[in-house]
Image: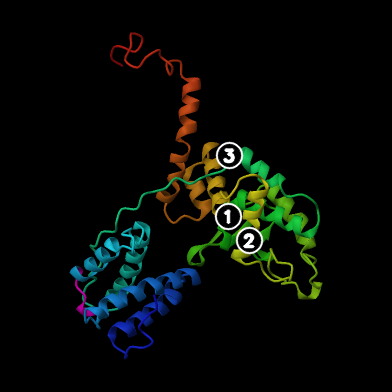
Amino acid sequence: MSSGADTQAPDGLGRLLAEHQTWLVVERGVSANTLAAYRRDLSAYQTFLRARGVTEPAAVVEEVVAAFVEALRTATDDEGRPRYKASSVARTLVAVRSFHGFCAEEGHTPVDPSADIAAPRVPQALPKALTEAEVEALLDAVVGDDPTALRDRAMLETLYATGLRISELVGLDVGDLDLEDGFLRAFGKGAKERLVPVGTAARAALAAWLPARGTPGRAARRRIDPDAVFVNPAGRRLTRQGAWKIVRAYGLRAGLGGRLSPHVLRHSCATHMVEHGADLRVVQELLGHASVSTTQVYTKVTQARLRAVYAAAHPRAHLPEFGGADGAGGA
């Protein structure tokens, strides 16, 4: 949905929405993708407000924000199905809260009318992690020692070893790698920097790839991006879309069907670490989660394994019948 800001006469709403966009970049340091999402969501909000004759943020009251959220929640398509997922509505409310919070903090409005609006409950889907055997099959699917194979092996090993987001992977510069000490520097959401350990397998794969960067394809050495760790055959920094396609292709080659994506490898890294006893706070730091509550989803993933270990190890886990003679009586 396109914004009416470019076609409407200037007013308080359009002016402050534009100032909010600048504030997101300068003060919050949000990424280009996050900025685009905020702009898209607030464009819909702006259209909603203008349709009700609201052209000044100070005129917005809590009931108006609640009505906007309800309109999104109950919107349906031509077949009567919900037009927006609960997660999309919740994300849009985050953008609206950010805008009104900005207006209140900067003194443009006396109060924040969105502060007490409840977001819709978003079902928390369990990550679809690969098994360790499937990860091994995936890594074995990279065959050969030509530059392309060296690059792809380094990509897959690094994604699984570090749990990087795909944008963090393609954003890596050569100067971000410290293979001697086994660390890399990643820039996550909001340009937040963190140090991430790199295991020996990924370090070896990166060490093999870096000298071959100059010849990923037919590109002349002088055209290679001097900073980017991962480049395409033309010598330019690999894009998110390009990296995604590479990962997906190896998933098909390894017999994983359409299950594999870079985010699945991120899930798999975290899940396997938790299964092997890693502390949630460590995994939180590794993944760059702002809150440990985000990381706690991985404890749910491992419940099946926990149950299996308990069943195999506890002497009274397999009584003949629940509540039977052997199990009768109090604790």
Q: Residues within 10 Å of mark 2 (few under 14, many from 20)?
A: many
Q: Position of residue 21 (x, y in %)?
A: 40, 78
Q: Position of residue 49 (x, y in %)?
A: 26, 77
Q: Residue furthest front?
A: 79
Span highlighted in magenta in the image = 58-62
Q: Which mark is residue 262?
A: 1
Q: Main secondary structure of the magenta part?
A: helix
Question: Which corner quadrant of the image does residue 208 belong to?
Answer: bottom right
Residue beneath the point at 33% across and 11% down: 324
Q: Position of residue 119 (x, y in %)?
A: 29, 59
Q: Position of residue 158 (x, y in %)?
A: 65, 53
Precedes in sequence: disc 2 or disc 1: 2
Q: Is residue 274 visible?
A: yes
Precedes in sequence: disc 2 or disc 3: 3
Q: Residue furthest bottom?
A: 9
Horizontal side of residue 232 vs 50, given as left or right = right
